[in-house]
Amino acid sequence: MGSFEYLLEALTPLNLMFALAGVIAGTVIGSLPGLTATMAVAVLVPFTFSMPPSTALIALGAIYTGAIYGGAYAAILLNTPGTPSSIATTFDGYPMARAGKGDLALTLACLSSVVGGLVGAGFLLLLAPPMATVALKFGPVEYFWLAVFGLTLIASLGEGSIVKGLMGGCLGLLLSMVGVAEVGGDVRYVGEFKSLLGGIDVVSALIGLYCVPVLIELAATPVRHLQATQQVAGFRLREAMAALRASKFNLARSSVIGTVIGILPGAGGSIAALVSYSEAKRTSPRRANFGKGEPDGIVATESANNATVGGGFIPTLVLGIPGTPPDAIILGALLVQGIRTGPTLFTQQGPIVYTFIWGLILATIIMLPVGLLIGRFAFRSILAIPKAVLVPAVALLTILGSFAVHNNVHEVQQMVVLGVLAWGLAQWGFSASPIVLGLILGAIAERGFVQGHLIGGARGSVLDEFFGRPISLAIIAFIVLGLLWPLWIKRRNRLAQARHG
C-alpha cells in the first residue's frame, strides 16, 4: 500500500499548515452557537478549490473535525450546543462548569475528541470498503428501529421524573411533525403561520431550548455564571488523564459506536453522542451522578461525535454516499477537484485518498494542543467577563446563529418562542433534552416507518419488512435490552440491600 510514503506526503509543510489552519478555523466556528460543522465546511470550502486535491481534502477534514470538537466549548461553558453533535455534552459538561470544574471538563472533552477522532480515522484507513458494504444494508426500516432505539433514551433524560421525561419527548415528537410531511406532502400543525411550512429548524430549536433559558436565568439572578474553585488550574491534564484511564472501556466503546453510527448515511454525531451517553449511563456504577457533572458523560459524548468524522467518510469515499451533511459538501468539493468517488477510488486514486486519511489523522493529533490552548482561553474569558457584558453578547450570538441558518427571521422567532417555552417548562421540572431528542429522532422515525410500510405493502407483508430483517432484529434486541437493563439493575440493588439489611 505504500502507507509510509503517503504519511510523508501528508507531513509536507503545506499540508501541515492547512491542517493546522483548518483545525483552528473549524474549532472557532464550531464554538459559536448556531454555526454548525456544516456551516464551517460550507463557508470555507471555496478557499480549497485552487489547492492540490490531497491538500484540499486535508484542509476540509481538519475544518470538519475541529468544528465537531469546537461545539463542546459552548456546551460546557454556556449550556448551549455549539453544534448539534454537542447536545449530550451539555448534560454533564455544564454542571461540571457550574461546580468550578469547567477547565477539567474542557480538557476531558479535548482528550476524548482526539481519541474518538483517531479511532474513526483508523477505521477509515483499515476497514473502509467492507464497512461501507455493511452500511448499504441499512434501509428505511433499520433507520426506523435505530430512531426508536434512540427514543428509549427519553426515560433516562428526564432529570428525576420519568413521566416528565416522556411528556417532554412527546412534545418533541409533536414539534417534529410540524410543517409539510416528507412522505405524502400533508400539511400539519401550521395553522395561519405559513412560515412553519418548512417545519421547526433543528439548529434554531437547539439554540432556543438550551440557550434562552440560561440567558433568562443569568439576567434574573445576581450570582456569577460560573464559579472557579480557588483559582483556575489551567489544563488539569493529570486529572483528565486519570479520568480517561478509569473510563478506558467507556472511551473505546463510545468511539466504536460513533464510528459505526457515522457510517450510516444521515445519522450523524448527535445520534452517536446520545446513544453513547445512554450506554455509558446504563452500564456505569455511578449512573446516579449522570446529569450532575459526571466526567464519564463527557468522555462518552465527545469521543463518539468525533469518531463519526472518520466513520462518515467511509460511505462518502467508497460509495459516493455522504454519511453526514458536511460529508455532502466535501463530496461536492471532490467533484470540483475532478475526483470521482466510488469502489474504484482507492485503487485508481489511492495516493490522494491515503494522503488525505493520514492528513486527517495528523489534523486530529494537532487538535490536542490547539483544543487545550483555545479551551483554556475560553474558560478564563467566560470566568472574567461580567454578566452585564456576557448576557447581551451571548444573546446577540443566538440571534445571529439562528438567522444564519437560512438567512430567515422566522428561525429567530422560532428560537425565541421555543426558548421561552423551555424556560417555563423548566420551572415545572421539565428538561429540554427529551424535547430535543423527540424533535431530532421523530423525523427519522416517521420517514423510516412510512417508507418501510410502503415497501412492505408493495412486497405483500408489512410485518416481514419490519420484523424479518436480520439487522432490524439485532436493533430490536438492543431496544429490549436497553429497556430491561435499568429494571434489572434496580432489582439487583434491591436484593443486595435486602441481604445486607
Image (cartoon, grey):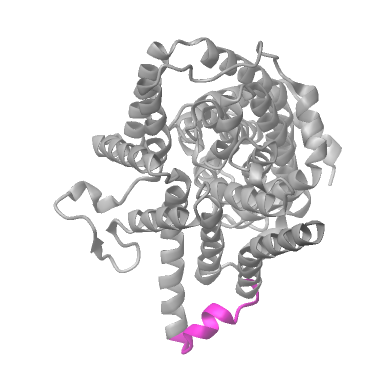
Prevailing secondary structure of the magenta residues:
helix
Direction from residue 256 to residue 313 in the image, left or right: left
- In the displayed structure, 101 sits above or below 405; it is above
| Residue depicted at x 70% and y 32% | 364
Indicate yes or no whether the magenta region holds residue 155.
no
Indicate yes or no whether the magenta region holds residue 463.
yes
Quarter of the image with the C terminus in it: bottom right
Count every numbered label the image shows and give the total.
0
Q: In which quarter of the image is residue 418?
A: top left
Q: Is residue 50 visible?
A: no
Provide residue 322's location: percent of width, then percent of height.
Answer: 54, 51
Q: What is the magenta range?
A: 458-471
Q: Which of 7 and 189 is in front in this view?
A: 189
Direction from residue 159 to residue 233 in the image, left or right: right
Provide residue 170's location: percent of width, then percent of height.
Answer: 39, 58
Direction from residue 196 to residue 113 in the image, left or right: right
